[in-house]
Amino acid sequence: MGTTVFKRKIYNEILEWKNNRSDKYALLIRGARRVGKSTIVEEFASKEFKSYIMLDFARTSKDINNLFEDLYSLDFFFLQLQQLTGVRLYEQESVIIFDEVQLLPKARQAIKYLVADGRYKYIETGSLLSIRKNTKDILIPSEEHKIDMYPMDFEEFLWAIGDEVTADTIRILMENKRPAGNTMHRSLMRIFRLYMLVGGMPQAVETYVADNNHANNPSVGMSLEKDAGRYKLFTSDVGLFVTLAFRDKKYTENIIYNKLLSDKLEANLGYVYENAVAQMLTAKGNKLFYYTMGSETSNHLHEIDFLISTGDKICPVEVKSENYRNHKSLDNFCRKFSSRIRDKYVVHTKDYKWENGINYIPVYMVPF
């Protein structure tokens, strides 16, 4: 069975590069392993170019790797590349893909000369941690346009499961700041909890779509890390987090998934929802910041889960899985920095409401 190609928003970003930047820049798509980089790039190449060569440096032959040892004659380089791959290249109509480019640093270094040559277009993909490490002995090309790819966001997940209605419904509710009502809210929360369980890794989503069940043993590594004096650590995918959080056997029993899906799991899910919010904010292009007030040695430590900038103002975001009315940290923060605040949000599992200057939004509204 071939890999399912899901609709991804990054496709339009790649198209923008092709139309407006590809004459001067190669495209470098960075992201955690298994978020779908190779799949979307090959799909794009097959649709938008007359021909393409896909070089997966995790599996390329020594003969192809050795081509990058000597780029003195690009005519001979391209001649050998076409012969070794069996693919004909057409000037201005072909793209060459360097997949997992961090595994062959000299190929990445060659981008400078290949782009300057101008005959073909170039797309690179690289895993986040490795692509930063494997640059010790090479000249990093400035001729790269970089974009980041993340696991499927909530809307992309809805598309994948064939739901073309829910995203528009939530968007309209958010724009009009209206509650959904009990019946619709319960339905929307159930769909969102399904997203939390499956996550946004295409392999897990593909398994769910095919079997109407959850992958029991995903093997995806954690990749989101902040190297600072004080930091929080989230997994890049909430589905992975759920699997790890409730994993006390070789596999996670479906009864746990079913209870969580039906909102009957007796456990503190605060950090699960916080991880989901972190993932959704990141997918929208936000950098993640949080704020603490008080002393960690006292009983008066207050923390704001997320701070989002809007223009010259900031929007504090508190995530609550249970008692959403208790938000002392948010209140104290807003009093202290009142002149800097634009909108205040409490993200929770209840329906939307606006009260005392605070937007109480259900978690499924965060992407919108």
Image (tube, grey):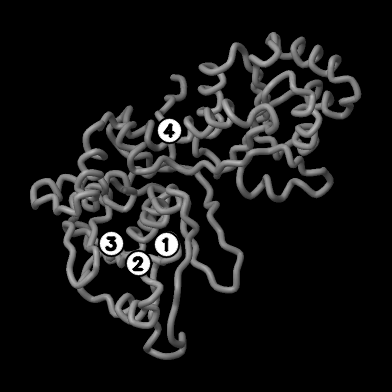
* Foreground disc of the pair 4, 1: 1
Q: Which mark is residue 8?
A: 4
* Image-quadrant location for residue 33: top right
Question: At label 4, which amino acid type do we have?
Answer: Arg
Real-space CA distance between mark 4 and mark 1, rounded to the nearest whole angstrom: 24 Å
Counting residues from the start of the chain, the first of labels 3 and 2 encountered is 2
Percent from the top left, x then y, of residue 91? 70, 13
- Which residue is label 2 attached to? 342
Question: At label 2, which amino acid type do we have?
Answer: Arg
Real-space CA distance between mark 3 and mark 2, rounded to the nearest whole angstrom: 16 Å
* Foreground disc of the pair 3, 2: 2
Residue located 29% across and 32% down the image: 161
- Which residue is label 3 attached to? 347
In the displayed structure, 255 sits above or below 80; it is below
Q: Which mark is residue 308?
A: 1
Question: At label 3, which amino acid type do we have?
Answer: Val
Packing grade of label 1 (10 A; few <14, some 14-19, many >=20) is: some
Counting residues from the start of the chain, the first of labels 2 and 4 encountered is 4
Question: At label 1, which amino acid type do we have?
Answer: Ile
Packing grade of label 3 (10 A; few <14, some 14-19, many >=20) is: many
Q: Quadrant of the N terminus?
A: top left
